[in-house]
Image: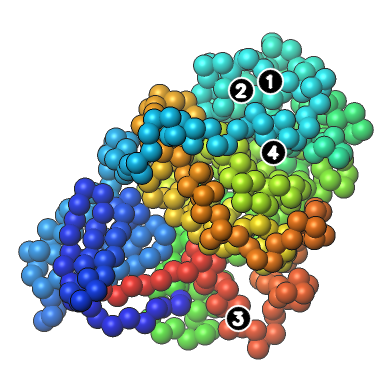
Amino acid sequence: MIVTPRKSTVGTLYLSSTHTIFVENSEALKETWVLHSLVYNVERLPANSSGSPLIIRCKNFHVYRLLILQEKDCLDVLACLTRLSRPERYGELFCFSFNPNLDKELREKAWGFIDLKAEFSRMGIPRNLWHVTAANHEYRLCDTYPSELFVPKSASPAVIVGSAKFRSRGRLPVLSYFHRDTGASICRSSQPLSGFSARSSDDEQMLQAIMKSNPVSEFMYVVDTRPKLNAMANRAAGKGYENEDHYTNIKLQFIGIENIHVMRNSQQKLIDVGELAAPSMSDFLWGLENSGWLKHIKAVLDAGVFIAKAVAEEGVSVLVHCSDGWDRTAQACSVASVLLDPYYRTIKGLMVLIEKDWVSFGHKFSHRYAHLDGDPKEVSPVMDQFLECVWQLMQQFPCAFEFNERFLIQLHTHIYSCQYGNFICNCQKERRDLRLKERTHSLWPHLWENRAEYTNPLYRTGHSQTRGVLKPLTTAYCFNDNSHVKPLYSRKNVYSLVQKVVLVYIANFAIHLKLY
């Protein structure tokens, strides 16, 4: 791990309702502010002759080491921080007290900065083949989907409702992305409730309607992002995957992205490797290998590559799902979109993509990133992995992206920080019921106003990388230099490899600040 050397600093610790603040006892009175919503663990070490050590680990991978002279004070800080970093209600989150001095009119305007209706219009969706259904008005069909859904125009209301009933949590197949050049589409859903033998004529007709909405193709892919064994195991619970004998003209493809529990454990192993004290190179690399993180990143990228190739090269539509359709499905659809569409490789385009495929389609932000004190088994670095995939693509195609890695770091921080209302709750209905647009502020205009800080100087709108479909290398443990093709396998590149692995796989710049 890259550790920033820093001398021991004496100061005063303050705890407010939202921040922990360390003020150095120096002429500069330098302050370090830590949002309580970013704290995921506070550990008290055994007291020694100097005092009581306390380690604050944050969700953005910053680590603060404190040495508190009095044990009682240390216990008080531990108790307060533990409580303040684990709010029980949404109303306790920082976004509800954060006030950047915007009046009501400006705040409402800020929430309109991202317009998903305009985004679907930008795609050039043919209205004779696709339309917005009213079936999910007031979220009556699926409460974790957006209220407006694009579906094939040939699908009747009865087919739409019947398909929803046959999909886990009502998450029926709907349009995520339309490729103007080929007419192929990327649709998304949850797994079917097929069990070992159940079937639904409505769901079968829905997939047939999606396939026929692409006039130039005689079949469509169904991409199940799960390992096949996992999907088969779900059959015992009455779920599973599409039976190719029941669905006409589909080709089923399993990808093999592991579930949220595997990913959570993988990231924790990676963090543990980063905290090793003076490890040997072999131990360090073994730890990275043992974490499996690179393997998981490869799986997500492979899913995106398969979908992008099907849509752009074969001209074939794709339906993507996992179990519930809000984790691996979001990863696969959004990575494929980044590969396919240069717009999503711009600063505003990535904001739009996250709003569309993650926020509006019900990725469980508050559960996955522990915004509230809840079930730790629901926590998983799903969005971390997507941002990681984008970073990897940036390394292979440095001229194709308008934004730099600082932009990704800002996104990562704000997903966890709860400073803005965009990523609070688990779906649009919850956000509406909580009146987030009236009570909190939007992150997107803030990032846009500061876009000069996040602009990649190598980005050129006329560059071939910028215009075309990206075709990345996804060979395991293959990091590319500026030629985009040279694997860093040689021993002379091991240290470069380690540095890149650490910077990326611990969320780009895990800095340990030692405050004694």
Calculate the distance from the C-alpha at mark 2 to the C-alpha at mark 4: 19 Å
Which sits earlier in the primary sequence, circle 1 or circle 4? 1
Residue 306 coordinates in the image, percent (x, y): 77, 50
At 72% across and 41% down in the image, what residue appears? 223
Q: Residues within 10 Å of mark 4 (few under 14, many from 20)?
A: many
Q: Secondary structure at mark 3?
A: helix
Q: Secondary structure at mark 4?
A: strand
Residue 150 coordinates in the image, percent (x, y): 69, 25
Q: Which disc, if any, is residue 132?
A: 1
Residue 389 coordinates in the image, percent (x, y): 63, 58
Is there any visible trace of residue 350 in the rendered image?
A: yes
Classify 65 as above or below 391. Answer: below
Task: Report which residue position mark 2 lands on.
Answer: 148
Residue 209 picture quarter: top right
Task: Report which residue position mark 3 lands on.
Answer: 496
User: Are circles 2 and 3 on residues that touch, CB within 8 Å?
Assistant: no
**The residue under label 1 is which amino acid type?**
Val
**The residue under label 4 is which amino acid type?**
Val
- From the viewer's perspective, is 194 left or right of 1? right
Which sits earlier in the primary sequence, circle 3 or circle 4? 4
Which sits earlier in the primary sequence, circle 2 or circle 3? 2
**The residue under label 3 is which amino acid type?**
Ser
Q: Nearer the viewer, residue 39 or 460?
A: 460
Calculate the distance from the C-alpha at mark 3 to the C-alpha at mark 1: 49 Å
Calculate the distance from the C-alpha at mark 2 to the C-alpha at mark 1: 6 Å
Q: Nearer the viewer, residue 239 or 5?
A: 5
Task: Report which residue position mark 4 lands on.
Answer: 320
Foreground: disc 1 or disc 4: 1
Classify 297 as above or below 484. Answer: above
